[in-house]
Amino acid sequence: MLTPEKVIGYYFGIVTLVGGISVLLAVKYTLQRWRSFPESGWRVQSFALGVLGLIMASILEAPLLFLKTWIALAFAAGIIEESVKLLPMKFFGRSPEWEKWKLVIGTGLFLGIVEGIMYTAGIFALNQEPYLVAVRVVLMGLHTIWAAVSIGFLLGETGWKRLAGLAFSMAAHTLYDLPPLAVADGYSGTVVAYLAGLSTGFLLVTPLMAKKAAELAEKLVPEEGEETGEVGENAEKTEESDVIF
């Protein structure tokens, strides 16, 4: 008999294997585009916004957690957590688009790392299966890639297509969380298997979406001499200030 517990065991194995390969491929495409942009100090800002985003998400998701409405929590997590990764768009609205692209991806990275550390501590504290740590590591990578997919389409596409990446990330995140939370809600093994199949399908498509998002971000690469012009302009302003003061 296909029990929910058996399905979840298989699902976590699939996440570790298929998800791990998907993350590696997606990271490869994202890093190739990353190297085409100028160097920038993204780490501190991204870390701060990643922590802020995680706090905001936790507060917004808390009522569903306390009410133990697990299926609703999966949908809320997908929508809220993928939205808060876009905080750099608000806080750094005047920055060049390539810099916002980096900051959003960095925010997703640090949100995933901080969340992963917290959950990993819980795994050891509750004496849960050690293989769950691998599942959390894969999710750290997915948090980063989902952010890259969202921002790649938002800045690289036009019209309603700009939202395609964000919609994908929200759906993929929701489906990732649904199988285990469906077990907690008492759904049958058949339903859990169906949800696990859908989630696996999104994991398989993730590298393709990451590749497309990286290609769309190509138009954000500054033209040759653009940064030099900005530096020269700032230098002139500095000289003027020196004369005044």
Image (tube, rainbow, N blue to C red):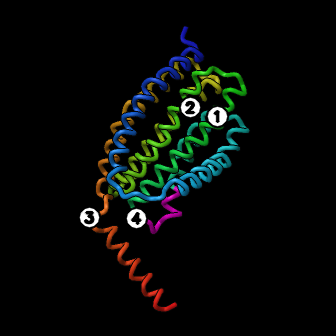
Q: Residue furthest bottom?
A: 244
The span from disc 2 to disc 3 (Cα, nearest Å) is 40 Å
Q: Say if 127 sits above or below 84 in the image.
A: above
Residue 20 lies, in percent from the top left, at 44, 29
At x 62%, y 37%, the residue is 117
Dot 2 or dot 3, earlier in sequence? 2
Magenta stretch encompasses residue 216 = no
Q: Do the residues labelled 2 and 1 touch (CB within 8 Å)?
A: yes
Q: What amino acid is labelled 2 in the image?
A: Arg
Label 2 sits on a secondary structure element that is helix
Dot 4 or dot 2, earlier in sequence? 4
Dot 2 or dot 1, earlier in sequence? 1
Label 3 sits on a secondary structure element that is loop
- The image quadrant that residue 210 belongs to is top left
The span from disc 1 to disc 4 (Cα, nearest Å) is 35 Å
The span from disc 3 to disc 1 (Cα, nearest Å) is 44 Å
Residue annotated with mark 1? 119
Query: Magenta residues?
Result: 87-95
Residue annotated with mark 4? 96
**Crowdedness near tag 3: few (<14), some (14–19) or many (≥20) residues, C-alpha within 10 Å:** few
Residue annotated with mark 3? 224
Q: What amino acid is labelled 1 in the image?
A: Tyr
